[in-house]
């Protein structure tokens, strides 16, 4: 009787201890609670940036823009001395011929150029562009020296370059002016060669007279009604 009472007395105590152990195990297996201020939602991966758009293709220059660019390159060559007067005259004669052909084509087509005519002009300008580059880099530079005659020659070239750049001089006018300068330059070179590298007083007087006439010619052509059409106004 005593043993039976002890058996039933120990049993509730054992069950109570087992339940406590089980609860402790359950609590240890539960995930830790989320901390304040943090989100339990997984972070969304960053979006892949869209590829950069390809740069827009530059539009091809118009006939007028191409012509203006050629004149600017020639003017720079004249100003820097990379182009001698004879070279400039040759280039501008070719440019004047292209301009004349373009003008005639426009007149025959109501002021416009056909696709075939535009292609033809572009081909001619490509050839002229190569010639400009070749003449500017052939080593044949204009060297006028520091003499009074040389400075006068350089000043005339600067004035022609400015007129070419600004559009005050057409290609044909520039060609004529540069042919005039070419003739004077050849005369000076021949006189110097015949006199041991110097000019006599009479020769200097003659060159100065010719340059005075050329100077008036430059002024008149820069201020007449003829101008080189510009693709866009220049400052």
Image: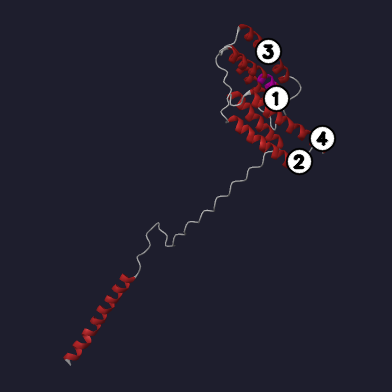
Q: Is residue 8 visible?
A: yes
In the depicted structure, whether residue 37 falls above or below residue 161: below
In the depicted structure, whether residue 206 falls above or below residue 28: above
- Cα distance between the residues tagged 4 and 1: 24 Å
Point out the tag, 2 or 3, that comes first from the N-terminus: 2
In the depicted structure, whether residue 96 falls above or below residue 61: above
Point out the tag, 1 or 3, that comes first from the N-terminus: 1
Which residue is outermost to the left? Answer: 2
Place of residue 229 in the rendered image (x, y in percent of width and height, measured from the top left): 72, 29
- Cα distance between the residues tagged 3 and 4: 39 Å
Q: Looking at the image, do the residues carrying marks 2 and 3 touch, with CB atoms under 8 Å apart?
A: no
Within 10 Å of disc 3 (Cα), the crowding (few <14, some 14-19, many 20+) is some
The residue under label 4 is 107
Q: 131 or 99, which lies in front?
A: 131
The residue under label 2 is 117
Which residue is located at x 19 percent, y 87 percent? 6
Q: Under tag 3, what secondary structure?
A: helix
Point out the tag, 4 or 1, that comes first from the N-terminus: 4
Q: 203 or 132, which lies in front?
A: 203
The residue under label 3 is 210
- Cα distance between the residues tagged 1 and 2: 24 Å
- Cα distance between the residues tagged 1 and 3: 17 Å
- Cα distance between the residues tagged 4 and 2: 12 Å
The residue under label 1 is 175
Task: Choose top left, top right, bottom left or bottom right for residue 168.
Answer: top right
């Amino acid at each position: 009787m005593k043993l039976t009472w002890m058996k039933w007395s120990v049993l509730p105590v054992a069950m109570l201890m087992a339940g406590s152990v089980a609860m402790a195990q359950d609590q240890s297996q539960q995930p830790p609670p989320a901390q304040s201020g943090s989100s339990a939602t997984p972070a969304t991966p960053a979006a892949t940036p869209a590829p950069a758009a390809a740069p827009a293709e530059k539009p091809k220059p118009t006939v007028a823009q191409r012509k203006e660019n050629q004149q600017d390159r020639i003017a720079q060559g004249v100003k820097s001395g990379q182009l001698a007067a004879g070279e400039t005259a040759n280039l501008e004669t070719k440019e004047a011929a292209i301009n004349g052909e373009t003008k005639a084509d426009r007149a025959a087509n109501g002021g416009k150029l056909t696709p075939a005519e535009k292609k033809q002009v572009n081909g001619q300008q490509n050839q002229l562009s190569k010639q400009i580059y070749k003449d500017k880099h052939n080593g044949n530079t204009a060297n006028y020296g520091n003499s009074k005659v040389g400075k006068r020659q350089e000043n005339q070239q600067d004035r022609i370059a400015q007129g070419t750049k600004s559009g005050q001089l057409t290609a044909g006018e520039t060609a004529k002016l540069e042919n005039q300068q070419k003739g004077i330059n050849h005369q000076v070179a021949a006189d110097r060669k015949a006199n041991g590298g110097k000019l006599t007083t009479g020769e200097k007087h003659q060159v100065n007279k010719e340059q005075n006439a050329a100077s008036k010619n430059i002024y008149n052509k820069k201020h007449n009604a003829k101008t080189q059409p510009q693709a866009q106004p220049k400052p």
